[in-house]
Image (tube, rainbow, N blue to C red):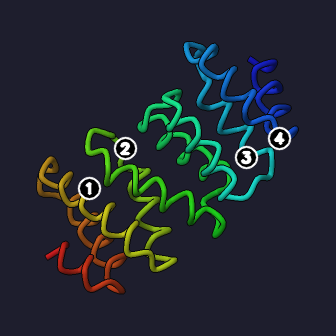
Amino acid sequence: DEGLARLLSDLLEGGQEPLLLDIVPLMAERVGLRAHLAQALHQSSRSAGSILNVVGDLINSGIMPSEQAFETYISIMDLRTWDADSIELAEQASRLLQQHPDISPSRSSLWQLLTIGSENRSELITRVTMRRLTASLKDFEAGEDLTQDLIQLRKLSLWSSSARSQFM
């Protein structure tokens, strides 16, 4: 697996995206490909826009399903510790959630997205993640966890009138 990670990194660092698009389908069945790709994209020190282009090319060529693209964005943001440079990736991840209701993100990913959306005053991220998180509240039983989630949702949505109205 170390060889796979090195190959992906070399292709990305060498500006060989067309070759990457040829090789990734051959490796699609390899366990951990998405994680290695996320690691290679992160290590390549590419801008968020460049990462979006690479992943977009993988989606558009039918190599990477939308759910894998979403998880790739989340993995890269995890590696970047959800820093301010992650906002473009978070917005694209939110677009994927909006366009593909079948994507099943983890609750922790949704909370991370909502937090970065709130911190950066992104209506898109906040609206999409609020919708997903409030829909998931019906699965909770009344108790401390539900109360804490409601408090946190309200706190993170105070700045946005559309998110607040969604919360109500």
Q: CA distance from mark 1 to mark 4?
A: 37 Å
* Up/down of 90 relative to 11, above or below: below
Q: Do callouts 1 and 2 mark residues in contact (Cβ within 8 Å)?
A: yes
Dot 4 crowding, Cα within 10 Å, few <14, some 14–19, many 20+: few
Q: Between disc 1 and disc 4, whose residue precedes? A: 4
Q: Between disc 1 and disc 3, whose residue precedes? A: 3
Q: Locate residue 57, reporting x and y percent.
A: 59, 40
Q: Which residue is mark 1?
A: 132
* Res. 102 image quadrant: top left
Viewer-proximal residue among 23 and 33: 23
Residue drawn at 63 percent across, 49 percent down? 53
Viewer-proximal residue among 3 and 106: 3
Q: Which residue is mark 3?
A: 42
Q: Which residue is mark 2?
A: 105
Q: Is residue 61 left or right of residue 48?
A: left
Amino acid bearing label 2: Pro
Q: Between disc 3 and disc 4, whose residue precedes? A: 4
* Front: mark 1 or 4: 4
Q: Locate residue 40, reporting x and y percent.
A: 74, 37
